[in-house]
């Protein structure tokens, strides 16, 4: 029997996957809810970082109706440290829609999945393929990189046209039965072998088919676009201790770190005298003020360059309405605080 190139690639890929697959909890029980939660958590986040969050999230919110009914603050707290908090807000919004429109069960059709908040082309394909057996390529960054190297693609892989070309490349490789296995095999191939730097070409089941490898320049693909420089913001952070608690304020409901709690801060790097003036304008009697270390936090498009002051407050007759005061227990159990402030919060309780 003659085996065409795509069928041969499928066979070599699935044989490699059977011998090398990563054992992950959402693969052991690939219900649509589990795959959905894992895929959203894995966006721009390493598998190793996600594992603990995934287990804790499912313990607290084991199904879609529970997620839909959960308070937003609980969802944000469960997500604390993962970043990109719009992901968990969209999860909750989508769960509400699934409960109201689909009886609490995710629909199997990728077109319907893509209409839910936070579910794009890739995530819809992954859920439909892995959980519902739909024969549809789930093309993420890993699969785009593999495809670009296989074909020595010289264009911009972020373009919609490139994604469509990659989907057409992969579609004949997906088997009729269990197409999700092939998609997960490709995810593992990109995560374990076809790495962004120093790809392990000699371990790759598709080495003989790879145009970039044949040229001897696999790291030249995908062709890299020049990244825009991040904007830098200078901030002064205040760790204000009052009556055994820390002053926090809630960020606006839209924008960066929307709806999370944070330490009060000011724009720019304030001198000690400027910091005291800032505190006086907020009616803070500073019994003691100490400079804290400098810190930097990098977002996708922005960097915060921070300095900080640890302030022991005495009488505070009229604190701003937007402030709350959180004990250590409350910070650990109730309020979601961005990791950007971890350096300063670590000095709250000594």
Image: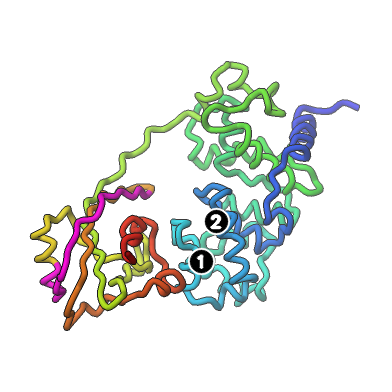
Q: Sequence order check: which comes first, mark 1 or mark 2?
A: 2
Rendered view: 122 above or below 98: above
- The residue at 65%/36% (across/down) is 189
Residue 20 quadrant: top right
Residue range in magenta is 279-299
The front one of 242 and 283 is 242
Q: Residues within 10 Å of mark 1 (few under 14, many from 20)?
A: many
**Quarter of the rendering occupied by the N terminus:** top right
Q: Secondary structure at mark 2?
A: helix
Q: Label 2, on which residue?
A: 41
Taken as a whole, is the magenta stretch helix, strand or loop?
strand
- Assess whether residue 129 is covered by the magenta stretch: no
- The residue at 13%/66% (across/down) is 278
Q: Which mark is residue 78?
A: 1
- The residue at 36%/57% (across/down) is 342
The front one of 57 and 300 is 57
Q: Secondary structure at mark 1?
A: helix
In the displayed orientation, state which residue is furthest to the top. Answer: 215
């Amino acid at each position: 029997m003659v085996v065409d190139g795509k069928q041969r690639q499928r066979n070599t890929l699935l044989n490699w996957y059977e011998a090398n697959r990563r054992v992950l909890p959402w693969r052991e029980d690939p219900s649509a809810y589990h795959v959905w939660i894992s895929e959203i958590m894995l966006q721009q986040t390493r598998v190793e970082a996600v594992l603990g969050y995934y287990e804790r999230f499912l313990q607290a919110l084991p199904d879609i109706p529970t997620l839909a009914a959960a308070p937003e603050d609980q969802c944000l707290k469960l997500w604390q440290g993962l970043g990109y908090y719009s992901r968990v807000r969209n999860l909750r919004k989508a769960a509400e829609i699934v409960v109201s429109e689909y009886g609490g069960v995710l629909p199997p059709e990728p077109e319907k999945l893509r209409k839910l908040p936070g579910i794009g082309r890739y995530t819809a394909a992954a859920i439909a393929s892995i959980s519902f057996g739909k024969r549809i390529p789930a093309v993420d960054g890993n699969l785009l990189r593999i495809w670009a190297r296989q074909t020595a693609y010289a264009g911009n892989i972020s373009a919609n046209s490139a994604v469509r070309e990659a989907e057409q490349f992969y579609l004949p490789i997906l088997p009729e039965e269990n197409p999700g296995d092939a998609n997960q095999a490709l995810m593992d191939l990109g995560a374990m072998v076809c790495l962004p730097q120093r790809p392990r070409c000699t371990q790759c089941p598709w080495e003989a088919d790879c145009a970039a490898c044949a040229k001897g320049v696999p790291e030249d693909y995908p062709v890299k676009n020049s990244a825009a420089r991040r904007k830098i913001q200078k901030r002064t952070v205040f760790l204000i201790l009052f009556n055994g608690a820390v002053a926090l304020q809630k960020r606006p409901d839209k924008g960066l770190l929307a709806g999370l709690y944070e330490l009060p801060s000011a724009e720019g790097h304030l001198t000690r005298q400027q910091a005291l003036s800032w505190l006086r304008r907020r009616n803070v009697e500073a019994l003691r003020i100490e400079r804290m270390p400098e810190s930097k936090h990098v977002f996708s498009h922005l960097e915060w360059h921070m300095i900080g002051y640890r302030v022991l407050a005495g009488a505070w007759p009229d604190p701003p309405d937007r402030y709350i005061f959180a004990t250590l227990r409350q910070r650990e159990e109730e309020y979601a605080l961005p990791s950007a402030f971890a350096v300063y919060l670590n000095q709250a309780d000594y």
